[in-house]
C-alpha cells in the first residue's frame, strides 16, 4: 500500500522497456499484398493511402523489398483480368496468384508465402463460391463450393504456397482443404483458417482494393455476427478440430475479447487488422488528428496483449521501419 508501494517507480524512463509484458517484433508481422493481372504499373488504392495493386511483373521487386525490410511472411490476394461464375482464374495453372507465387519463390525462397484462399475476387457475382437458391433466397451454396476450395488450395500449393488461408467461412472448409492437400502430396503445406471471421463493415476499403464488391446480397449468411462471442469461439474450435494449423480473428481491433478466447484453444492465433482499420488511422493521421506511428504501434500492441501471435497488417512495412529507428 501507499506510500511503500508506488507503481510510478515502474515507469521511470529506463524501466519501461525492461518491464514490458508485451513486445512487438518484425517476426510477428504478415504483410498483405494485392496483385492485379490487368495492371501494367502500380495502381494506388484510393481508399487505402500508401497501398497499391501491384502488376505481376513487380512480384520479385516487391518481395525482395519486404524481405530486406525484415518481413518474414506475405499474404497474397489476386485480381484476375477476367471473372466468371466458376472463379476459373482462382485455380488456373497460370492464374494471377500462381504466377506471383512462382516469381516470389524464385526471387526469395526464404519468404513465407501465404495465399488468401477464396473465390470472391474471381467470381462475376462477387461471392465466395457457388451461388444458388438457399432457404432465404439466393446465396452462397456450402457443400457445392467445397470442391472449388479444394481445387484452389491444390493449385496454390502446386505453385509453391507455404500456407493456404481459406477465408470463405464455409462449414467444413478446413477438413476438405486438408484432405485435398494431403491427397496431392502437400502434407507440409499449412492451413491458416480465417476461423473467426465476422461480417464486418470494416472490409469496405478492401472492396476497392480487391475489386470484390458483390452483385447481390451481402456476407451475413456465412460470416459471423459481431454480437456473438460464443459462436465465434465455436467457429475456431471446429476449424482446429478439422486440422487447421493456425487460427485467425478478423477484424482485429474491435475483437480483442475473441482473440483472448481463441488463444485458449492452444493453436497459434493470427489477428487481421483489416482495410477499414488501416484507412481510419490513415484518414485521421492525414488530417493531423492522430499521430500515425503512435496509434499504429498501440493498436498492434493491444492485439499482442489480447493474445495474438501473428499480426496481419497493411502497416507491416512501416512498422519495420519504425522498429529500426
Ligand atoms: C475475402 C476476403 C475479404 C477480406 C480478406 N479476404 C473480404 C470479405 O470477406 O468480404 C477483407 C480484408 C480487409 O478488409 O482488409 N473473403
Ligand atoms: Zn471471399
Image: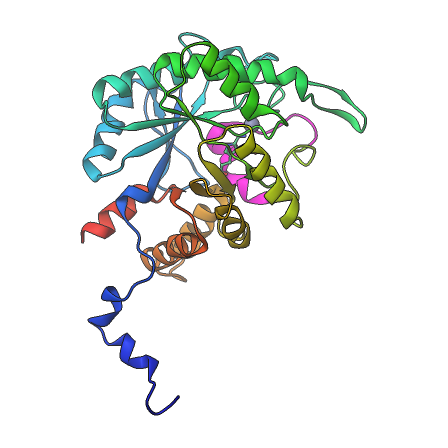
Q: Is residue 196 left or right of residue 222?
A: left
Question: Which residue is outermost to the bottom?
Answer: 3
The image position of residue 96, as x and y in percent, is: 40, 16
Q: Is residue 245 left or right of residue 100?
A: right
Near-viewer residue (313 or 285): 313
Extent of the magenta region = 200-217
Question: Which residue is outermost to the top?
Answer: 93
The image position of residue 203, as x and y in percent, is: 54, 40
Res. 94 image quadrant: top left
Q: Quadrant of the N terminus?
A: bottom left
Near-viewer residue (43 or 294): 294
Q: Quadrant of the C terminus?
A: bottom left
Residue drawn at x 70%, y 33% as measured from the top left? 221
The image position of residue 232, as x and y in percent, is: 61, 43
Res. 36 image quadrant: top left
Q: Is residue 245 left or right of residue 219?
A: left
Question: How many discs mark residues in the rendered view?
Answer: 0
The image position of residue 62, as x and y in percent, is: 26, 28
Give ligand 2's quarter of the image: top right
Instruction: Decide whether residue 92 is among the magenta residues.
Output: no
Residue drawn at x 23%, y 65% as measured from the top left? 18
Residue 58 in view of the camera: no
Amino acid at each position: 500500500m501507499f506510500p511503500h508501494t508506488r507503481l510510478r517507480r515502474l515507469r521511470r524512463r529506463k524501466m519501461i522497456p525492461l518491464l514490458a509484458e508485451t513486445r512487438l517484433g518484425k517476426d510477428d508481422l504478415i504483410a498483405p499484398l494485392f496483385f492485379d493481372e490487368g495492371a501494367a504499373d502500380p495502381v494506388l488504392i484510393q481508399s487505402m493511402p500508401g497501398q497499391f495493386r501491384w502488376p505481376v511483373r513487380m512480384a520479385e521487386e516487391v518481395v525482395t523489398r519486404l524481405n530486406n525490410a525484415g518481413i518474414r511472411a506475405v499474404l497474397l490476394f489476386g485480381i484476375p483480368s477476367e471473372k466468371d461464375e466458376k472463379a476459373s482464374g482462382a485455380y488456373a495453372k497460370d492464374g494471377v496468384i500462381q504466377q506471383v507465387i512462382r516469381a516470389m519463390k524464385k526471387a526469395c525462397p526464404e519468404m513465407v508465402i501465404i495465399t488468401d484462399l477464396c473465390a470472391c475476387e474471381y467470381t462475376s457475382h462477387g461471392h465466395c463460391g457457388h451461388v444458388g437458391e438457399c432457404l432465404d433466397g439466393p446465396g452462397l451454396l456450402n457443400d457445392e463450393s467445397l470442391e472449388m476450395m479444394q481445387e484452389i488450395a491444390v493449385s496454390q500449393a502446386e505453385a509453391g504456397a507455404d500456407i493456404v488461408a481459406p477465408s470463405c467461412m464455409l462449414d467444413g472448409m478446413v477438413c476438405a482443404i486438408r484432405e485435398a492437400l494431403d491427397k496431392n502430396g502437400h502434407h507440409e503445406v499449412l492451413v491458416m483458417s480465417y476461423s473467426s471471421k465476422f461480417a464486418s463493415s470494416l472490409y469496405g476499403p478492401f472492396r476497392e482494393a480487391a475489386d470484390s464488391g458483390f452483385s447481390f446480397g451481402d456476407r451475413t449468411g456465412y460470416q459471423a455476427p459481431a454480437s456473438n462471442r460464443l459462436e465465434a469461439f465455436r467457429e475456431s474450435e471446429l476449424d482446429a478440430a478439422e486440422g487447421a494449423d493456425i487460427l485467425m480473428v478478423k477484424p482485429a481491433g474491435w475483437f480483442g475479447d475473441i482473440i483472448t478466447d481463441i488463444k485458449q484453444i492452444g493453436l497459434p492465433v493470427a489477428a487481421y487488422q483489416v482495410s477499414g482499420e488501416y484507412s481510419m488511422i490513415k484518414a485521421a493521421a492525414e488530417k493531423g488528428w492522430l499521430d500515425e506511428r503512435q496509434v499504429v504501434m498501440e493498436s498492434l500492441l493491444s492485439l499482442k496483449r489480447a493474445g495474438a501471435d501473428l499480426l496481419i497488417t497493411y502497416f507491416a512495412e512501416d512498422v519495420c521501419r519504425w522498429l529500426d529507428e
